[in-house]
Structure formats: C-alpha cells, structure tokens
Amino acid sequence: MIGLGTWKSPEEEAYNAVTYALDAGYRHIDGAAIYRNEAAVGRALRDSRIAREEVFVTTKLWGTQARNPQEALEQSLARLGLDYVDLYLMHWPVALKMDLVTDGNVLTIPTKLNGERDIDPDWDFVETWKLMQDLLKTGKVKAIGVSNFSISNLEKLFCSDGVTVVPAANQIEIHPQLPQTELVDYCVKKGIVVQAYSPLGSSSSIMLDDPEVEKIAQKYDAEPAQILINWGVSRGYCVLPKSVSQKRIVSNFKIFQLAEEDIEKLNGIPARLGSRRYVVPDWGSFPTFE
Ligand code: A2P
C-alpha cells in the first residue's frame, strides 16, 4: 500500500532513501527513467541483499522513447542492474521529439526554440501501448501500466484495435486537494490498480501546514504527512510518498486507521483550501487531464 517515491531525489540521496526505506520495511520502490537516478535506486536494491522477488520495483518509459519501449526498458534495466521490473508504466500519454536534442540524451525534456515542449504529434500513445504489450512476452516486465491517464485517454485505449491488455495500474496525482474520485472509481471498475503520486502535494504543498490537518495529526500523535498518507490508504489504493529524509521515510510508512469524522474533514479540504493540481507540466494542446 505504501511505496517510496523517488522523483526529485538526486542520485546519492536516492541511494540513501531506498536504503532507509528497505530498512524501514518498505517493499515497493517507485522510479522512472526521467528521474535520472535509476542507477542509484538499483544499487541500493542490490546492496540491501533483500531477495529480488520480495521487492516491487516500478520504472517508467519517458516520452522521447515512446516509439521504442523495448530499447528504453533494456536501458532502464541496465541502469537499475535488474533482470526485470515488476511494473513498467508509460509515464505520460505524450510522445516527445528528439530532433532538437543536440547531445542525443533521451532522458531530457526536449524544448522548441520558443521554449515549448517539443511534442511529437505524429505518434499516438495507443501505438506505444501496443509495443508495451509485446514486452510482457520478454519476461522483463511482470506487468505494464500507465501514468497520468485521464478517463478519456483510457477510454480511447480501450476502444482501439490491437489493444489486448488492460493497464495493470494508473499512477496519478492524488491527495485531499485533488481526490480524483471519478477517475479512481473508473479505474477500480476496470480492474486497474490506482497508485497515488505526490500524496503530500509535492514540494509546495499547503496541506502540510494546514491548521485543520495539524489538529487531526495531534489527535493521533502523528504528523500531518502521515494523516495525508493514511487518508489515501483509507480510500483503498496505493500511496507513494517521496522523501530523502530517514526520519520521514520511517514515519511515512506507518499505517493507522483514521476515524470516519477525520476522513470527512479531509474530504472537505477542497472546499476550504481549494482544489489544486501540483504537478502540471505544460503539454501544450495535448489533452492530458480533463
Ligand atoms: P524530503 O524529501 O526532504 O522529505 P510528495 O510525496 O507529495 O511528492 O511530497 C514530497 C515532498 O514532501 C518532498 O519535498 C519531501 O521532502 C516532503 N516530505 C516527505 N515526507 C514528509 C513528511 N513526513 N513531512 C513533511 N514533508 C515531507
């Protein structure tokens, strides 16, 4: 239910974070090629000496490699130093062009001269998904899924010829300011596991300092972050808090039962603090979120 997020964890800190997490009992590590720390994550996994099959490891396909997930996966596995990942996700439903990337590094966010992201309009995420389906046969992924997919993009996937595999998971931003109830319910109905990223509201969260959340935390002798994480756990999906601090990694892992009245108070956060999506990359006119 609780996995370690590694977005924004620099290489060396990511090594320590994964080590702290595995020591604290985490058995689920969430990564991505574009986080540029797969080598450190993989080193920490190997150095832990925990049997490979005991840890659930996710990585993600970056948009510059949308046309070649097989090659991207091989490269991720080489950086991780693993034979397989448990879950391979399409990071965004958006393909990116490499035409203007002068150093050839695919783990980048290509931009046009006017500063906009260099989106590849000629490549559809359905094609990426069909290529990802073939990866299942290689044994190098136990499951494939998506990330940042809206209901309409999932619907488009399901309606497309050649799509035979339902995504195992959809990893999306979820926290009390962005409960995503309709999308969560849709995924559950389709048998797609929901994974919540940025469950604390990422690095500029206003929820962690909210007096109401602090008051609930006091009641459980807990920290605001633990309240936000357990709000997600109580809704029945997997939650992926990121931290590089050992103390926080340990405390973020604690599951406890929130009283219904406190869950209701947390459900009331959008009315009080406003709804907010914290992770909003500019994908131009590409339809990511409704
Ligand atoms: P740090 O890595 O220094 O601990 P999210 O998981 O929503 O993306 O949030 C990650 C952000 O929240 C990071 O800035 C992380 O900083 C911070 N964070 C993680 N755990 C806690 C915690 N228990 N209390 C406060 N902030 C936290």
Image (tube, rainbow, N blue to C red):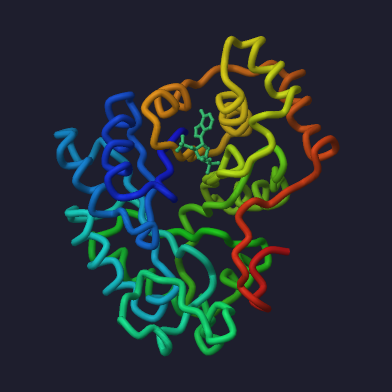
Q: Is residue 135 above or below residue 85?
A: below
Question: Where is the C terminus found, in terms of image quarters?
Answer: bottom right
Q: Residue at x 23, y 48 (%)?
A: 42
The part of the image, by quadrant, that contains residue 74 is bottom left
Question: Vertically, is 135 above or below 125?
Answer: above
Count of marks, rendered view: 0
Q: Splitting the image into 4 quarters, where does residue 108 fall?
A: bottom left
Establish if 269 lies above or below 279: above
Residue 140: percent from the left, percent from the top? 24, 60
Q: Where residue 189 sits: x, y (%)?
A: 63, 49
Q: Residue at x 67, y 29 (%)?
A: 209
Would residue 29 be found to the left or right of residue 201 on screen? left
Task: Provide residue 29's location: percent of width, then percent of height.
Answer: 35, 42
Q: Is residue 81 left or right of residue 182?
A: left
Question: Which residue is depicted at the point 63% across and 33% down?
Answer: 235
Image quadrant assignment for residue 79: bottom left
Q: In the image, 236: left or right of 64?
A: right
Residue placed most toward the observer, 115 or 242: 115
Residue at the right extreme, as displayed = 271
Horizontal and vertical percent position of residue 157:
57, 71
Which is nearer the eye, 82 or 251? 251
On screen, 155 above or below 21? below
Residue under the image location 78 percent in, 34 percent down: 269
Q: Looking at the picture, tell me which residue is in the foreground, 222 or 131.
A: 222
